[in-house]
Amino acid sequence: MLTSQRKSLILDILRRDGQVIAKQVAESLSLSEDTIRRDLREMAAEGLLKRVHGGATPISPELPDFSTRKDVSLEGKQRLGVKAAGLIKPGQMIFLDGGTTTAEMVRHLPRSFAFTIVTHSPTIATDLEHHPTAEVVLIGGRLYKHSMVATGAVAMAAISQLRPDIFFLGVTAAHPVHGLTTGDFEEAAIKRHISGCAADTYVLLTEDKLDRVSACQILPVSGVSGLIVPSEVKEAQLAPYRDLNAAILEA
């Protein structure tokens, strides 16, 4: 088997199982563990996976601050924002998560009918200052500056009183095995709480977040109504997510 074929197989295993165990792969291919470990080292250097003792796991995305992330994948975020905004119906209560992708969605919210936006992000609320038809409810609490969102008991208590029609969830990573994840425990908890209060949860995902894993799980992929993804993502990459019964909406 060629090196390129082995590496392709390793990536398939990583997507399917969420981890690669060098000994198991070596045995299945009748190769030495040293050969597989060398492949894993090279793939880690190429940014395709993260080496751990005995094998590899999906890579964790970097977590630059909010202002740095604003211009990353901007065109893709704009398309996701347009698609997400198109799901909103008159009179609905919509909960917008913090983050740069949902911030881009604000620019495309409907202006021809009334609805309510709830958010725990002061930056999202500020962006809606001049929106002509959106009623805005801002949830307060302890400010998590990386994503510019309120967290903690005060925010949890306020959110518990609401039943949004749709929650548009932002994550740092998505994986069919490890689910939807983010880098902070408290932020993951409040995202999970909002989703539990909402009738439907949709996740906006730029391509760079797929098949990656951050430290703190929010929900399994099967726990949301749908994923909104760029149209250029290949079907082979989306297939494991479709198998988990989440709708895939392409933008």
Image (cartoon, rainbow, N blue to C red):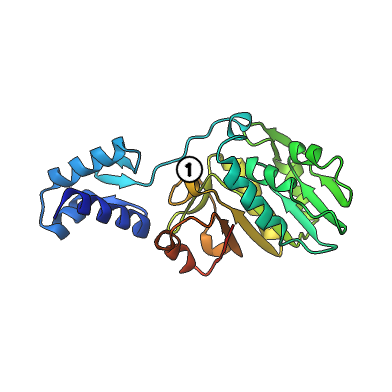
> Position of 235 compared to 66: left or right?
left
At x 54%, y 31%, the residue is 64
Where the N terminus falls, by quadrant? bottom left
Position of residue 153 relative to residue 26, above or below, is above
The residue drawn where x is 48% and y is 67% is 242
Residue 144 lies, with reference to residue 96, above or below; the image says above
Instruction: Report x, y in % for residue 128.
Output: 82, 42
Among the 4 quarters of the image, the one containing residue 251: bottom right
Which residue is found at the position 43% from the left and 65% from the top? 239
Q: Is residue 187 visible?
A: yes
Q: Position of residue 142 (x, y in %)?
A: 72, 35
**Percent coordinates x, y for residue 54 in the rendering:** 24, 44
Report which quarter residue 90 is drawn in. Answer: bottom right
Q: Residue 141: tell me if it is visible.
A: no
Please tell me in which quadrant of the rendered image residue 151 appears: top right
> Which amino acid type is marked by label 1?
Ala
The correct choice, above or below, for 245 with respect to 190 in the image is below
How many numbered dots are placed on residues in this image?
1
Which SS class for mark 1?
A: loop
Residue at 74% x, 45% y: name it.
107
Q: Nearer the viewer, residue 210 or 249?
A: 249
Mark 1 nearby-residue class (10 Å; few <14, some 14–19, many ≥20): some
Answer with left or right where residue 17 lies relative to residue 92: left
Residue tagged 1: 215
Residue 166 location, x and y as percent? 72, 60
